[in-house]
Image: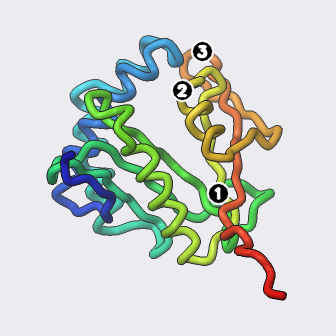
Amino acid sequence: MADVGVRPARRADAAAVADIQVRTWRQGYRDLLPVAALAELTGAEAQETWRDRWADAVSSPPSPRHRLLVAVASDLVVGFASHGPADDDPDHDPAHSAELLTMLVDPLHQRAGHGSRLLAATVDTLREDGFDTLITWAFEEDNVMRGFLGSAGWAPDGLARTLDMGEPVRQIRLHTDIRPAETGTET
């Protein structure tokens, strides 16, 4: 088995992260997003913008509690996850609620446990930072992501939003409690 794991991203990982984002969106979102919007988000100019943004996310995150993690296999970046306080959701206290901003695994490396490792490392990091709830927004029709998160204990919380991407695209919010499970009681 290849040497696999998750680590904090480095500035040098920005190009690989942007490449994974574009490849994954092109494949995974082709039936979820309008063609023009997807082309704009994954074109050459956008890819360069994503590289710069991911490099900034590593070197100048908005806060110390914003993180970018990468999944690696034999020193090759094969996926990533970013998270931070749930600042944009007024019904959540950003001191205790975090948001999984994105989590993607390269299509060539999916179904090898990288997503599970990324999610576990994200939860571990957030627990260390004192968070107890984790939320994320997923495309309503993204059955792959919703199924993956559902198998890890996530559930819709009843909120939805519609993005204007040339056509309306609906997202739903999912949440999970990340507090450590009680280990039992002493007698």
In this rendering, which labeled residue sits more in front, label 2 or label 1? 2
- Please identify the quadrant where the C terminus is shown: bottom right
In this rendering, which labeled residue sits more in front, label 1 or label 3? 1
Q: Could you tell whether 170 is left or right of 145 in the image?
A: right
Q: Residue 180: horizontal and vertical position, in percent?
A: 66, 70
Residue occupying image coordinates x 64% and y 19% = 168
- Residue identified by numbered label 1: 134
Q: Earlier in the sequence, mark 2 or mark 3?
A: 2
Residue occupying image coordinates x 15% and y 50% = 74
Q: Earlier in the sequence, mark 1 or mark 3?
A: 1
Judged from the image, the secondary structure of the residue bearing numbered disc 1 is: strand
Q: CA distance from mark 1 to mark 3?
A: 29 Å
Q: Residue 109: horizontal and vertical position, in percent?
A: 28, 34
Q: Looking at numbered disc 1 in the image, what kind of residue is underneath it?
A: Leu
Residue nearest the observer in this picture, 112 or 1: 1
Residue occupying image coordinates x 59% and y 64% = 85
Judged from the image, the secondary structure of the residue bearing numbered disc 2 is: helix
Above or below for 130 versus 54? below
Q: Looking at numbered disc 3 in the image, what kind of residue is underneath it?
A: Glu
Q: CA distance from mark 2 to mark 3?
A: 22 Å
Q: Looking at numbered disc 2 in the image, what kind of residue is underneath it?
A: Val
Residue nearest the observer in this picture, 155 or 96: 155
